[in-house]
Image (spheres, helix red, strand yellow):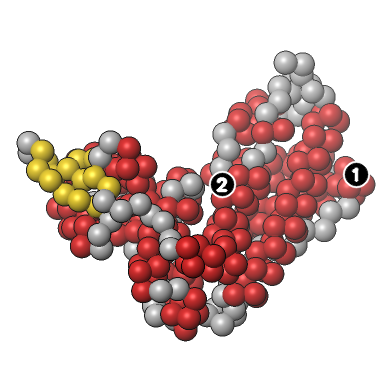
Amino acid sequence: MTDVSEKEFLNKLLNVVHKLAGIANTQGARFNTKWEEYLKPLNAKPHKIRQIKLDKVKFIEDINYRISMLEEVEKAFVDGYYSIKSLLDTLYHSYFNDSKLLLTDFSKEDQLMLKYYIAREILGNLVQYNQMDHETVPLKYNILARNYLLIKLKGQTDSEILETMKKLQIKDITISKVNELMEEIEADGIVSKSNQEQNFFYTLKKELKLSAQGKENYNRKLRSLIEWPTQFWRSFYNIRELNVSIDEEIPQRDFLHQVLSRTATQGFTAADYVFKNLIKYYKELQETSS
């Protein structure tokens, strides 16, 4: 890998900021539009992603402006997290609470299935988000979202389910709590329980599928909103273009190299860390040059 110069790195950083601004603006607007179309009656003010206006020339030439743009992107990272949280909170604490929208659009059977289905579609795809937020969605639906595929493929013991849930950094999760929740899921007709030596063993009884009419209504009303978090997360929290080797002559090269090493990992934690430290890096350069 060829080392990049200070100028080359700054251009790469500009390209990444430009890409992220575009994603924030287009995906943020898409989220707002889909929300207005369906969920606005339940929550008129979800957390929105800020719009980012970038002047490319000023970003290169003005370090104060560059720092301010990096700060805006870092704030937009946080906005993204809270937009997803707003969606889940509105769904699980308003929409599924016998809202008029739910009762009008879905049968009783589909209403129950949707709670599991949506948790799987969002939390099942976004492990890191789920590690950061495992309170918004009731644990009953979270536990199936996290374990659905393995239960479907080969079944899972209560101990195996417990180990999976511990990876989400959930405090005070116990084997008895797992079995309590799985019994509720069994009562909903989703899983079956049997004894296996010292454990309970769970297998899938009913797949997470909506009725034909439920699927049609879901596709018209909810699908775009439910797919949005995964699409947004995988594009916005990806800054691998900054995973470069930098020239020895770049100021504070060791610090910058250590920061950029995190760009090889996709996700909120790495992206937020990198931008916070790039802000720190350019502020320190600003101080030393003044």
Q: Nearer the viewer, residue 19 or 73?
A: 19
Q: Which residue is mark 2?
A: 268
Q: Which three-letter amino acid code belongs to the residue tagged 2?
A: Phe
Residue 84 appearing in the image: no
Q: Determine the residue positioned at 20% across, 51% down.
A: 192
Residue 92 pos. (x, y %): 42, 69
Q: Residues within 10 Å of mark 2 (few under 14, many from 20)?
A: many
Residue 270 pos. (x, y %): 57, 40
Residue at the left extreme of this rendering: 197
Secondary element under disc 2, as helix, strand or loop, is helix
Marks 2, 1: nearer the viewer: 2
Q: Determine the residue positioned at 29% across, 59% down.
A: 140
Question: What numbered label is drawn on residue 160?
Answer: none
Q: Which three-letter amino acid code belongs to the residue tagged 1?
A: Glu
* Count of marks, rendered view: 2
Q: Nearer the viewer, residue 85 or 256?
A: 85
Question: What numbered label is drawn on residue 61?
Answer: 1
Q: Nearer the viewer, residue 17 or 206?
A: 206
Q: Earlier in the sequence, mark 2 or mark 1?
A: 1
Q: Quadrant of the N terminus?
A: top right
Q: Residues within 10 Å of mark 1 (few under 14, many from 20)?
A: few
